[in-house]
Amino acid sequence: MNLFGAYGNDDIILIDEKKVYKKNDVIKLVLSQMEHIKNYGTVVVSNRSNFNFFINFFASVFLDKEIYLLSDNNKIKELNFKYELLDEIAEKSVVNVELPKISDNKAVINFYTSGSSGCPKVVKKTLHNLIQEGLDLKEKFPVSKGANSISTTTMAHLFGMTFHLFYSLLSGFKICTKTINYPLEVNNFDNYIFISTPAFLQTVKNYNIQFKKLPKYIISAGSKLNEDVFEFLISSNNKIIEIYGSTETGVIAYKNFPKDDFTKFDNVEIEIKDNKTFIKSKYIFEKVVEINDNIELKENKLVLKKRKDRLLKIFEKRISPLEIEEKLNRNEFILESYVLKSGDKLASIQALSDVGRDFLLKEGMGSLIKNLKNYIGKYFEIIPQKWKFTDIIPKTQTGKIDTYCINKIFNVNCSYPVILNRIEGEYFITYKIFFQSSCNFFKGHFDGFNILPGVIQIFIAKEFSNRKFNLNLGEGQWKRIKFSNIIFANSIVYLKLTKKEKTVDFEYFDDDKTYSSGCFLLENVFRGLKNELI
């Protein structure tokens, strides 16, 4: 198959920032990169830039390389085989502009994912699997050739690969490779489809953002789209496609309205046998895969029930964290929760509602936890004993719960302050944070006169920088540290982080004064320790 056959020679395939690349431009870049990497063995294609990813991916495909894709570049440290990392591209002049023929059943792409259990796993796909999926989506959701395709996720994740790359490529769309990081960036486009995650769309709803020009479709996948977000988007006349599927299966079903059941895709077969659910389609490497969801079938419709996994064992008793989360989410203090096992205890992290934040600031952390324990204790025998509070449950770029980040919050020896709110852009973020007196770093510093230690201010700024900018800052990478005023226990302050070319600057302040400031050096950033604790 001609992968670029939907385009004429003068048609635009890629838009990177404000620069456009027509069909022949793209082919020349792919051929140039093929010459550059032709002697490489197994390759890992970096997701740092969607533009470079596109060129490196197809150069590897046409060279019949064994390809590994990482949705999180930090996972490269977990690879235990020899590989070449493809990040940049080499632009060399080429005379021939004809790509070689390939066998789409022979080319294999390995998606390196965390899996439902959090344990790393490899999911294989053939190029044929990806092309067939893209063609079926093109037929199911037709949009005129030349529309802009914009996305909040990386192409290295199957959701981005399926929709931002193959559905868009086979439909003849202009693929905008700059990742959409903030809702207002959407307003720079017209005649577009918008590929996003439930976490991003939740932000759109939270800030009541209205798109100036409506997309042809908003396509959402990665996790469940909350009904209130769905309804908010539809109330603004957006056309929504919520996708149900997984890396293993590809797309399974879709729906366009929050109250609807999912509609099965035509080329997907579902079999339920002995309380097990099997998916069969042309999008699956081995044709059939078992999934962990409970599904009720109604002809071509399906109803999702509770997943069979994520059961926790506490004191020899099986606990369903989903049931506890559902009940917690009905409490007026909570917007969203996530329940996990931390050590031998049940733990829960909560995104607080406005009511919950007000109660915390007025009554204190102890009263809030006691209130929630009394509430959840009416429904369950075993309840969370460890509690953390924030403004947003940590999510990955693909919109899934960031279990690594959440586990670190519970396992680190230093208490985290409560994030009350945040304002962010691509290169900055300002947190409104509450340093509650129950934080363990106030103990002994000093009795009867609790003040925030300077080393904790640096630690919190570093950890939040790592989280926001996907860094791995270690110890000893700071300079120009200045402490100007004391931060007392139970203070509300702002922490602003600004990423520059060579540094990340931080400042603690409020409306009246600056408390401290400094910067972290980005040189040798990957020398930092992955799990350093204070």
Image (cartoon, grey):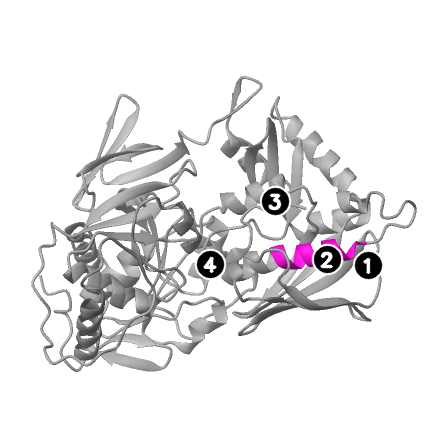
| Residues under numbered marks 4 and 3 in contact, where contact means CB atoms less than 8 Å apart | no
Q: Which residue is mark 4?
A: 201
Marking on residue 418: none
Q: Which residue is mark 2?
A: 457
Magenta span: predominant SS is: helix
Which type of secondary structure does the marked residue at label 2 adopt? helix
Which type of secondary structure does the marked residue at label 4 adopt? helix
Q: CA distance from mark 4 to mark 3?
A: 25 Å
Q: CA distance from mark 2 to mark 1?
A: 9 Å
Most extreme residue toward the right is 448
Q: Which residues are magenta?
A: 452-463
| Residues under numbered marks 2 and 1 in contact, where contact means CB atoms less than 8 Å apart | yes
Which type of secondary structure does the marked residue at label 3 adopt? helix
Q: CA distance from mark 2 to mark 3?
A: 16 Å
Q: Amino acid at mark 3?
A: Ile
State whether residue 332 appears in this view: no
Based on the displayed image, in which of its 4 quarters is residue 138 positioned? Answer: bottom left
State whether residue 504 appears in this view: yes
Residue 101, image x, y percentages? 7, 63
Q: Amino acid at mark 1?
A: Ile
| Residues under numbered marks 4 and 2 in contact, where contact means CB atoms less than 8 Å apart | no
Q: Which residue is mark 3?
A: 409
